[in-house]
């Protein structure tokens, strides 16, 4: 019996240990960086015409007609953007809808008139200061079902997105909110949308309200794409007069309910580079749209099918190495990137993300109301350690709300770096700031706090005159190692400055609830004043909606920051004349400086994203932090390695 | 017997009502606003107010709590399981596909489990302390002690990463495969999660069946049967196994009703779009209506399993219904 037991256990151990060997062990071990990938010749024929091969190895790796992509997490299946904010659905949405709009976004994050869509446009400003863009569409624009895309479809999109019926159907859209008459049309008090007009089948106009102008990113205000009116609302017509346009349709409400309940999960008529095939079991499959008009540069997709398939985060890099996946966009974890770089059959492209990681503070409640406390906390964390711990060193430090990918940083990064204080862990500095705050006493509320008595065990804390200890209640998502390293750092460093820093790890929704809606809570219910999260920066950088005092007591200004100087700079920034880049940069530098002085959040890092591809995929070098996925897909192709 | 069954059913009705009240109360106590969860944070304040009001009406959240409860209960009885805040669509639509996948996966697991564990359990009891019994004892001890995620990951590393015979996880795609190729894809994706779940479940059921059979084989009537000169097969299957059926029926009934219960960890590891994975996503995403509806559904299944077990006990052992 004993021999048999021993034998069985030995067999089991061999099995377990062989199973736990790293897969990448077959790759040559080297500390040198992976060799730069060679640019292969473009395939002579479109890969899409080849039949998939299924013999031997991974079926997927050898299938040159289909690109298998991991969206990074589970999709919800919302393929019309107004019904859900799941970013992972975006991988499919972008392919279906593309950048078929009046204005396109370039890989550098610039906005340009989309000449593939727009044949001509004119602008006119009336006496009241309202500015009208009149667009004439190119011939030959088609929906995926072959029907022509007309000016009616563009007008329909603006009207439908802003209509109260769309809100009733459960949609939430901000489209058109810069246009004249938006509020009255959106809340149902006006029948027509004054800023939208249909001129003929090829021509329509959009009028920006005078109070929104000037605006640096003016093109964004008229960036509208088409919705398929013949598919969504077959009975509808557009009635357009000098007073504006409206949708005439007796069944509008019912038809929009149909959009909300059925079409949004399987939109069969779309204008983008791909058209919908199926979404089942977390697998979305799309195939080439032969009627696609092309990207703003006129490019067409080359890969016949794209499959976006949920793959567990823990094994997605192994799936790529094994050839089960072709593309793993935006990998951030160092262990995955290192394993992929070590494999012989994959290639990578790294770039610093268009965003950053931060610790946000409630500036209206708790100890973090005081900028001295916020600055002290900034000096109690080693941000290099955060990057090393959380991202294996793949990233850089930022000192304000900016990203390295922003055009302003590319042009004036050196100037900004000189302007901002490069703070890092410094307990003495933290104590200096705290001595200027109300938390400068010992527990009796009278005796001045003596920093030399503070120890790492946290028994000697700071108190205010009322005898309240300086306690920071921080909440972070349990799903990210960034929360772990923040806890490690503050548990070690905060007591040295007399701060009791308590970290709670919760689910992401709980974090967002407390962050965005803390201002609604009573003092008894409110508990957290510090939150760690990631933050993406849109190419059209407008901090007004996030930090301006116009948005106090709303979730837009979640930090509840209010500063007249900062307000003024944000208004000045957005009201810079379009094209006056130098003026924009000057104001942006002042804004960043003032923002740092107030320290409403601690910018921690700008981490690196790595797009990883299997060896049969080419063209990933077109990817940039601001590249539009629907444009990137047209640069990718598959060929035998 | 009919009286016995009616009595059991009547007892279950208040149990179910209590469960629904408790679950509904829990959803109301849970932090967070389900209406807010439906709306994007990018809306500007006036847009947010309009959208909030419309969504609140749509979800029935503007009604009083008793109204909400009875509305929810009435909807549940008619098969309307509510609206998922995470998926932003009816719960019934969200779970239809995963529950089918879970049933498909579990059918394979149950077939393997019953086909292996019943004969092996009986044979182990009959040949107690022989090499066959010892092997399965060690096997069941090791696999029963092993967490399913560990076993699953080991299988992934061996068969998907090293040997590359099978995919790491996922589901077949009907858009790219059809006919037998599609069936083949199903089998490829099913193999690893089925083996993982089967190994774990076989371990426990073998032990239960073996012990029940050993108890039965030690009874006096078995000795009497053997003394009468009955063939050993008759002794084992007609006398011993029939009397060992009560604990065995618990395993079988429990297994059949577990068809709908997803295995959260295994489904997550293998990216199998099953109900367990959906439930864990709902919990982490605080999808209140999804959690509530699914728990009610699982409670109903559990209660039915208990009812069927009771009826089966009554059928197998007349003493149970007489008492």
Image: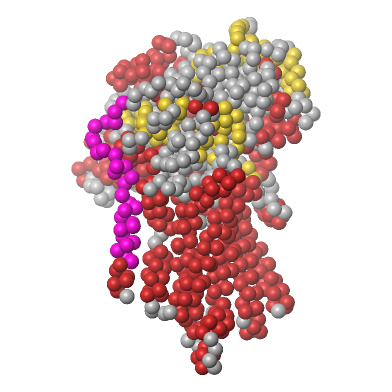
Does residue A28 show up magenta in the picture? yes
Residue B12 appears in the rendering: yes
Residue A129 position within the rendered picture, expressed as x and y whole percent measured from the top left: 60, 9
Residue furthest toward the right?
A250
Q: Is residue B198 above or below residue A339?
A: below
Instruction: Give left or right: position of A361 versus B78.
Output: left
Image quarter hosting the C terminus of chain B? bottom right
Q: Residue at x 52, y 60 (%)?
A: B109
Q: Residue at x 62, y 21 (%)?
A: A291
Q: Please name whichever residue, A289 or B15, is drawn nearer the observer in this view of the structure.
A: A289
Does residue B231 show up magenta in the picture? no
Q: Please name whichever residue, B135 or A510, is drawn nearer the observer in this view of the structure.
A: B135
The segment highlighted magenta reads A8-36
Instruction: Give left or right: position of B176 versus B8.
Output: left
Total numbered badges shown on the rendered structure: 0
Residue furthest toward the front?
A55
Q: Is residue A126 above or below residue B36?
A: above
Q: Residue at x 53, y 16 (%)?
A: A298
Colouring method of the image? secondary structure
Image quarter hosting the N terminus of chain B? bottom right
Q: Please name whichever residue, B240 or A500, is drawn nearer the observer in this view of the structure.
A: B240
Residue B47 position within the rendered picture, expressed as x and y whole percent measured from the top left: 61, 30
Residue A131 position within the rendered picture, expressed as x and y whole percent measured from the top left: 60, 10
Residue A506 appears in the rendering: no
Q: Is residue A614 above or below residue B26?
A: above
Q: Please name whichever residue, A17 or A109, is drawn nearer the observer in this view of the structure.
A: A17
Residue B175 position within the rendered picture, expressed as x and y whole percent measured from the top left: 58, 38
The quadrant holding residue B181 is: top right
Q: Residue at x 65, y 31 (%)?
A: A268
């Amino acid at each position: 019996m004993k021999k048999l037991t021993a034998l069985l256990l030995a067999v089991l151990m061999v099995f377990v240990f062989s199973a736990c060997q790293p897969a990448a062990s077959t790759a040559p071990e080297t500390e040198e960086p992976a060799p730069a990938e060679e640019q292969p010749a473009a395939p002579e024929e479109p890969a899409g015409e080849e039949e998939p091969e299924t013999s031997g190895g991974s079926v997927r790796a050898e299938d040159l007609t289909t690109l298998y992509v991991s969206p990074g997490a589970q999709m919800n299946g919302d393929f019309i953007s107004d019904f859900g904010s799941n970013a992972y659905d975006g991988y499919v949405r972008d392919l279906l809808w593309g950048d078929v709009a009046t204005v396109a976004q370039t890989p550098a994050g610039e906005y340009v008139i989309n000449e593939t869509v727009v044949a001509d446009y004119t602008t006119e400003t009336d006496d009241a200061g309202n500015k009208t863009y009149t667009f004439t569409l190119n011939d030959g624009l088609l929906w995926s079902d072959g029907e022509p895309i007309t000016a009616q479809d563009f007008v329909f999109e603006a009207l439908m997105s802003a209509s109260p019926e769309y809100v009733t159907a459960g949609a939430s859209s901000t489209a058109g909110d810069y246009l004249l008459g938006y509020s009255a049309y959106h809340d149902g008090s006006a029948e027509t949308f004054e800023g939208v007009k249909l001129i003929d089948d090829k021509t329509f106009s959009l009028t920006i309200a005078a109070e929104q102008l000037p605006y640096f990113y003016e093109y964004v205000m008229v960036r509208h794409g088409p919705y398929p009116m013949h598919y969504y609302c077959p009975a509808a017509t557009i009635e357009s007069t000098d007073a504006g346009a409206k949708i005439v349709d007796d069944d509008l409400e019912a038809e929009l309910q149909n959009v909300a309940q059925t079409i949004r999960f399987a939109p069969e008529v779309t204008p983008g580079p791909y058209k919908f095939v199926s979404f089942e079991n977390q697998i979305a499959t799309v195939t080439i749209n032969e009627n696609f008009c092309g990207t703003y540069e006129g490019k067409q997709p080359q890969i016949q099918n794209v499959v976006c398939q949920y793959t567990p985060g823990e094994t997605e890099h192994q799936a790529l190495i094994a050839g089960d996946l072709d593309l793993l966009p935006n990998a951030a974890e160092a262990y995955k990137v290192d394993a992929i770089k070590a494999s012989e059959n994959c290639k990578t492209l790294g770039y610093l993300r268009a965003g950053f990681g931060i610790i946000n503070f409630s500036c209206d409640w708790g100890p973090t109301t005081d900028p001295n406390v916020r600055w002290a906390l900034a000096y109690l964390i080693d941000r290099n350690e955060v990057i090393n711990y959380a991202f294996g060193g793949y990233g850089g430090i930022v000192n304000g709300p900016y990203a390295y990918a922003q055009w302003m940083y590319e042009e004036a990064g050196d100037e900004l770096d000189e302007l901002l204080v490069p703070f890092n862990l410094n307990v003495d500095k933290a104590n200096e700031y705290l001595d200027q705050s109300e938390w400068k006493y010992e527990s009796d509320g009278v005796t001045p706090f003596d920093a030399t008595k503070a120890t790492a065990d946290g028994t000697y804390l700071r108190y205010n005159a009322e005898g309240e200890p300086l306690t920071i209640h921080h909440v972070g998502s349990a799903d990210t190692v960034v929360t772990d390293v923040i806890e490690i750092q503050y548990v070690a460093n905060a007591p040295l400055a007399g701060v009791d820093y308590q970290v709670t790890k919760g689910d992401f929704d709980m974090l967002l609830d407390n962050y965005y809606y803390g201002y609604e809570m009573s003092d008894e219910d409110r508990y957290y004043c510090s939150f760690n999260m990631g933050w993406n920066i849109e190419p059209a950088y407008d901090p007004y909606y996030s930090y301006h005092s116009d948005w106090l007591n709303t979730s837009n200004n979640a930090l509840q920051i209010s500063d007249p100087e900062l307000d003024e700079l944000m208004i000045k920034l957005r009201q810079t004349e379009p094209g006056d880049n130098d003026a924009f940069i000057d104001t942006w530098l002042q804004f960043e400086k003032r923002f740092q002085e107030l320290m409403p959040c601690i910018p921690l890092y700008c981490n690196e994203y790595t797009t990883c591809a299997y060896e049969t995929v080419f063209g990933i070098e077109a990817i940039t932090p601001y590249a539009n996925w629907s444009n990137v897909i047209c640069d990718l192709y598959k060929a035998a390695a | 017997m009919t009286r016995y069954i009616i009595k059991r059913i009547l007892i279950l009705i208040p149990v179910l009502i209590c469960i629904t009240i408790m679950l509904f109360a829990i959803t109301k106590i849970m932090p967070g606003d389900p209406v807010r969860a439906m709306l994007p944070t990018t809306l500007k304040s006036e847009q947010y107010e309009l959208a909030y009001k419309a969504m609140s009406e749509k979800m029935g959240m503007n009604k009083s709590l008793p109204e909400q409860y009875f509305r929810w209960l009435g909807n549940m009885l008619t098969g309307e399981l509510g609206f998922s805040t995470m998926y932003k669509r009816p719960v019934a639509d969200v779970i239809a596909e995963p529950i089918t996948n879970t049933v498909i996966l579990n059918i394979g697991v149950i077939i393997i489990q019953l086909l292996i564990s019943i004969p092996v359990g009986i044979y182990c009891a009959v040949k107690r302390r022989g090499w066959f019994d010892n092997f399965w004892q060690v096997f069941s001890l090791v696999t029963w002690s092993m967490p399913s995620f560990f076993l699953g990951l080991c299988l992934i590393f061996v068969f998907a990463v090293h040997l590359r015979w099978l995919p790491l996880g996922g589901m077949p795609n009907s858009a790219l495969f059809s006919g037998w190729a599609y069936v083949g894809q199903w089998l490829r994706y099913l193999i690893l999660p089925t083996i993982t779940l089967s190994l774990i479940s076989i371990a426990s059921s073998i032990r239960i069946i073996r012990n029940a059979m050993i108890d039965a084989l030690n009874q006096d009537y078995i000795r009497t049967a053997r003394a009468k000169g009955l063939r050993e097969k008759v002794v084992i299957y007609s006398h011993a196994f029939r009397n060992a059926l009560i604990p065995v029926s618990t395993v079988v009934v429990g297994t059949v009703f577990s068809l709908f219960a997803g295995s959260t960890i295994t489904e997550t590891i293998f990216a199998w779009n099953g109900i367990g994975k959906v439930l864990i996503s709902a919990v982490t995403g605080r999808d209140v209506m999804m959690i509530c509806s699914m728990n009610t559904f699982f409670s109903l299944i559990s209660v039915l399993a208990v009812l069927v077990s009771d009826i089966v006990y009554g059928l197998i052992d007349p003493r149970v219904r007489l008492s």
